[in-house]
Image (tube, rainbow, N blue to C red):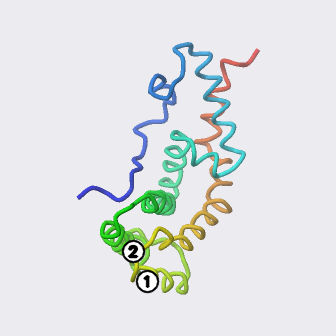
């Protein structure tokens, strides 16, 4: 059975592996400039970071190093869940998400309050795209206020930002 999460940790943090796939030119200087511009935008908001393919993968690697990657994983799973059209498939997926992230002692349990957990349990009786909305907001808020500021100060982010800005120095 495939994993609910679509994220996989990067094998390494070499940003120029997949230049053609992301539409960058073969010009290394141009690529580094674009990388630097993209990476510097990550510090503007968590939303910008998560909207970047590489940003999300690097943030996930950082969260893994802090043993809190279940938050991002849950957030991504919820984004995918909202796109499900079939009510049968939605109900089935909701049960899997609940067992993996929501129920007490779940293997990837996220940090939410009892009231939210009970609201989700009620919502699941008739699963809909908003079933996990409150928990997703809580998890996003935790990442935004806690993990994201630490990420911006982390060696991972600082090193990558410094390495991509190198060729542009005069």
Q: Earlier in the sequence, mark 2 or mark 1?
A: 2
The count of marks equals 2
The residue pinned by badge 2 equals: 98
Query: Height in image: 101 above or below 55?
Result: below
Give x and y (percent) for residue 69: 48, 58
Q: Residue 16 bears which disc, if any?
A: none
Query: Height in image: 116 above or below 7?
Result: below
Residue sitting at 62 percent across and 50 percent down? Answer: 151
Give x and y (percent) for residue 60: 50, 50
Please tell me how crowded label 2 is: few (under 14), some (14-19), or many (20+) other residues with Cα within 10 Å.
Answer: some
Residue situated in front as seen by the camera: 168 or 46: 46
Q: Quadrant of residue 163?
A: top right
Q: CA distance from mark 2 to mark 1?
A: 8 Å
Query: Height in image: 23 above or below 107?
Result: above
Residue closest to the far left: 1
Residue situated in front as seen by the camera: 92 or 115: 92
The N terminus - image quarter: bottom left
Tag 2 near tag 1, CB within 8 Å = yes
Give x and y (percent) for residue 2: 27, 55
Secondary structure category for the residue under label 2: helix
Residue sitting at 38 percent across and 71 percent down? Answer: 94
Residue situated in front as seen by the camera: 18 or 170: 18
Secondary structure category for the residue under label 1: helix
Give x and y (percent) for residue 126: 40, 80
Query: Height in image: 1 above or below 51?
Result: below
The C terminus - image quarter: top right
Q: Residue 121 bears which disc, if any?
A: 1
Q: Is residue 123 left or right of residue 46?
A: left
Q: Is residue 106 left or right of residue 159?
A: left
Q: Is residue 129 left or right of residue 169?
A: left
Residue sitting at 41 percent across and 75 percent down? Answer: 127
């Amino acid at each position: 059975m495939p994993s609910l999460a679509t994220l996989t940790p990067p094998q390494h943090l070499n940003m120029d592996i997949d230049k053609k796939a992301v539409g960058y030119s073969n010009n290394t200087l141009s690529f580094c400039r674009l990388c630097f511009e993209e990476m510097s935008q990550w510090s503007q908001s968590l939303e910008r970071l998560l909207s970047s393919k590489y940003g999300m993968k690097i943030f996930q690697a950082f969260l893994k190093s802090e043993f809190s990657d279940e938050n991002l994983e849950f957030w991504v799973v919820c984004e995918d869940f909202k796109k499900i059209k079939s009510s049968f498939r939605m109900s089935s997926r909701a049960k899997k998400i609940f067992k993996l992230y929501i129920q007490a002692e779940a293997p990837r349990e996220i940090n939410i309050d009892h009231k939210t957990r009970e609201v989700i349990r009620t919502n699941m009786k008739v699963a809909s795209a908003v079933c996990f909305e409150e928990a997703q907001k809580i998890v996003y808020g935790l990442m935004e206020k806690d993990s994201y500021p630490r990420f911006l100060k982390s060696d991972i982010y600082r090193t990558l930002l410094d390495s991509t800005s190198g060729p542009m120095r005069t």
